[in-house]
Image: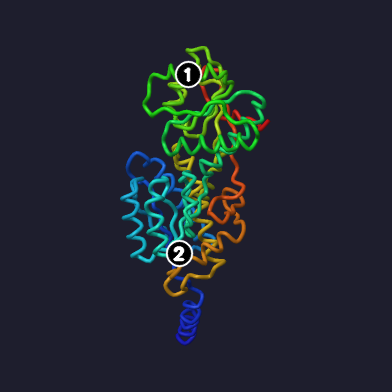
């Protein structure tokens, strides 16, 4: 009997190291505190569940480990996180989420040979900087601007269009993309202008819009200024349709715009899928912010994990990855099945074929202003 037990134990010892794989670490750089903490916690929840599901698929072994870190949503702290991950040998990172944090930290990760998949960071020029290591799941501002421009060119063909922005990098980038698309369609805007965030008196600008006889206005900017512009237009008797990006996707937009907001058209990514429910576990309540980003974080982990498997770069004994370039090459090589559906990237690192929806704000039967479910087909 004793001899049999010794033989069984010897068998386990013989096959254990050959079959075992040291866990591979994936860093998460997210705003776990600060003004965007609700999004950061959603990113963490999505990434943690993806890692748990991957390990469950691997028979319960700790094949993957998530290492979360708080970047506060700002550049300096994101750089500190990047340096810590680099020193610890982490070569796979989900995040950062904000464009400014990505812009500051991406070069640090590039020098360390680490690959980033950011669920957010819509600022278009980020992926035009020649970084081999940056991949973006969210549609860029330029991509949203192109869709908005195409919509305007078709819905308002032969009519007069004005383009405004809030003079921020974000707003101007959107406005420029719309202008470029309209120019391609042979119907350039009749007025291109901007006003600073926080401006309250737009009477002169609206008078110019009226003089230009515009029937549609594209606005690149955020919800407070969009609401101010709409109220000023309606008070001046200008009924032109406002078109904007998901920059106006703010709970305060409906309240600030009031009845003037009805009919506003908005580009945005389609509603993300819900995280898969954990079998046998009680469903945890999730905030709207969590629901809006958790699926992207889940998909980012899936993308990195599958790219590592294809590239075969993880050391079986330590789980470490010496250089992330083969992982980046695998991400660019073709599409990967994820919670978001098939995902692929172009040479710049932008998602290819990422869908962008058109929604219109309308009054609900109970009198609220909402966009949910109000899909608008491209003309």
**Mark number displayed over residue 62:** 2
Q: Position of residue 8 (x, y in %)?
A: 49, 81
- Compare residues 120 and 42 and report the one nearer the observer: 120
Horizontal side, residue 119 vs residue 159: left or right = left
Rounded to the nearest whole Å, what is the CA distance between mark 1 and mark 2? Answer: 60 Å
For the point 42% across and 27% down, the residue is 195
Q: Which quarter of the picture shows residue 361?
A: top right
**Mark number displayed over residue 248:** none
For the point 49% across and 55% down, the residue is 301
Q: Position of residue 365 (x, y in %)?
A: 56, 18
The residue labelled by disc 1 is 206
Q: How packed is label 2: few (under 14 Cα within 10 Å), some, or many (20 or more)?
A: some
For the point 60% across and 37% down, the residue is 181
Horizontal side, residue 88 vs residue 7: left or right = left
Q: Position of residue 128 (x, y in %)?
A: 50, 51
Q: Position of residue 161 (x, y in %)?
A: 58, 25
């Amino acid at each position: 009997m004793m001899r049999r037990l010794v033989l069984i134990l010897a068998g386990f010892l013989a096959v254990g190291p050959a079959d075992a794989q040291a866990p591979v670490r994936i860093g998460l750089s997210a705003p776990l505190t600060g003004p965007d903490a609700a999004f950061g916690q959603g990113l963490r929840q999505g990434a943690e569940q993806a890692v748990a599901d991957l390990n469950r698929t691997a028979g319960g072994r700790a094949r993957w480990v998530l290492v979360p870190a708080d970047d506060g949503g700002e550049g300096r702290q994101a750089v500190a996180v990047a340096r810590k991950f680099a020193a610890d040998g982490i070569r796979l990172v989900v995040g950062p989420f904000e464009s400014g944090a990505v812009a500051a930290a991406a070069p640090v990760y590039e020098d360390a040979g680490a690959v980033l998949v950011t669920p957010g960071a819509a600022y278009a020029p980020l992926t035009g900087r020649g970084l081999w290591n940056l991949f973006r799941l969210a549609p860029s501002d330029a991509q949203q601007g192109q869709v908005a421009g195409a919509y305007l060119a078709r819905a308002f063909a032969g009519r007069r269009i004005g383009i405004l922005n809030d003079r921020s990098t974000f707003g101007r980038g959107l406005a420029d993309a719309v202008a470029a698309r309209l120019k391609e369609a042979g119907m350039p805007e009749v007025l291109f202008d901007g006003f600073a965030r926080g401006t309250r008196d737009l009477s002169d600008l609206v008078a110019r819009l009226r003089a230009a006889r515009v029937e549609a206005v594209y606005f690149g900017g955020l919800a407070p200024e969009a609401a101010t512009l709409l109220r000023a237009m309606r008070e001046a008797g200008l009924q032109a349709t406002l078109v904007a990006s998901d920059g106006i996707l703010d709970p305060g937009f409906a309240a600030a715009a009031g009845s003037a907001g009805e009919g506003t058209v908005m580009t945005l990514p389609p509603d993300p899928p819900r995280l898969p429910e954990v079998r046998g576990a009680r469903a945890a309540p999730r905030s709207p912010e969590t629901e809006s980003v958790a699926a992207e974080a889940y998909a980012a982990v899936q993308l990195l994990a599958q790219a590592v498997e294809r590239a075969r770069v993880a050391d079986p004994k330590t789980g470490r990855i010496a250089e992330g370039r083969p992982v980046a090459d695998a991400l660019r090589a073709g599409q990967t099945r994820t919670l978001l559906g098939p995902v692929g990237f172009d040479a710049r690192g932008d998602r290819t074929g990422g869908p962008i929806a058109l929604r219109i704000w309308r009054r609900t039967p109970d009198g609220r202003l909402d966009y949910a479910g109000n899909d608008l087909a491209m003309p």
